Image: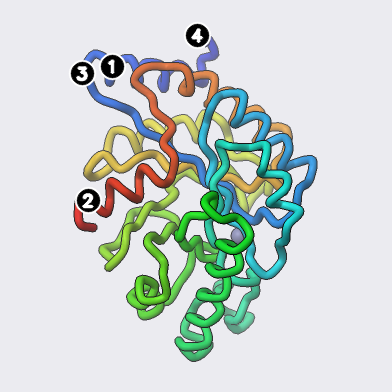
Amino acid sequence: MTTDPIWQPLVEELARRQRAGRKAEFWLRDDDAVDPTPALDRLLDLTGEFAVPVTLAVIPAETDEKLVVRLGTAPHATVAIHGWAHRNHAPEDQKKQELGAHRPRKVVLDDLAGGLSHITGLHGARAVPMLVPPWNRIDAAVVSDLGSIGFAALSVYGPPKPASLAVINSNVDIMDWHGTRGCRDHGLLVQAIIAHLQHAFDDEPVGLLTHHLVHDESAWLFLERLFAVTARTEPCAWRPIRTLIGRSARRGK
Ligand SMILES: [Zn+2]
């Protein structure tokens, strides 16, 4: 498989799990898609090559039929709703939020209902009623109303909090947003994946978070290596988001 010392700990962790008869589940969320671009082509080609299902969090206000046409040749891609316009409504001294408590809740919910309707109208069965809040932030009161406007799931970042709908979070972000703004160190990412596999509550899958529009070569290389190690390896499984939402619903979460 691989003899790269950076990846060896993951290879060994997967072998341990195989001996124990345990799966290692992953899912891939990629944010900020709007239009077909060379970077999106690269993401779809790479994931397609390794048969990795990808959930694209698409910004409703910015997107149109061009993306629908492009995804017509990417059957492994699913589309989720990335807020409405990815616009910040928080004051300058606060963390960026589109879906915070800075506007009346009804206004935020109307935006989100419009986003769901626009994406579903464009993408039909390829769309999944999952909200991916821009910057992974959303007011708790808005979360409690998401079911009433048609959402079945929410995906933010980090350990999931109890909610009235399925919560399928991402938990390993490959980008170093506060440092180089390129890919994080590959060895640290491998350690983060192993830590999640070992400590995740209830066997929550590893949710890998990517942003194809800003990937440097190191980010693409990381993905390629990760897919090479995992995608064709027992006991790994890259799950489509629908599978995870369905399972979460059956568990009553
Ligand atoms: Zn975003």
Q: Nearer the viewer, residue 23 or 49?
A: 49
Asked whether the beta carbons under mark 1 and mark 3 sit within 8 Å of each other, the answer is yes
- The quarter of the picture where residue 158 lies is bottom left
Residue on which the image places disc 3: 20
Of the residues shown, which amino acid type is indicated by label 1? Gln
Residue on which the image places disc 1: 18
Residue 204 position within the rendered picture, expressed as x and y whole percent measured from the top left: 30, 43
Distance (Cα) linking label 1 and label 4: 15 Å
Distance (Cα) linking label 3 and label 2: 25 Å
**Which residue is at a point 41% across and 61% down the rendered structure image?**
154
Q: Earlier in the sequence, mark 1 or mark 4?
A: 4
- The quarter of the picture where residue 175 lies is top right
Q: Nearer the viewer, residue 73 or 115?
A: 73
**Which residue is at a point 73% across and 33% down the rendered structure image?**
217
Residue on which the image places disc 2: 250
Tell whether 106 sits left or right of 12: right
Tell whether 8 sits left or right of 118: left
Q: Secondary structure at mark 1?
A: helix
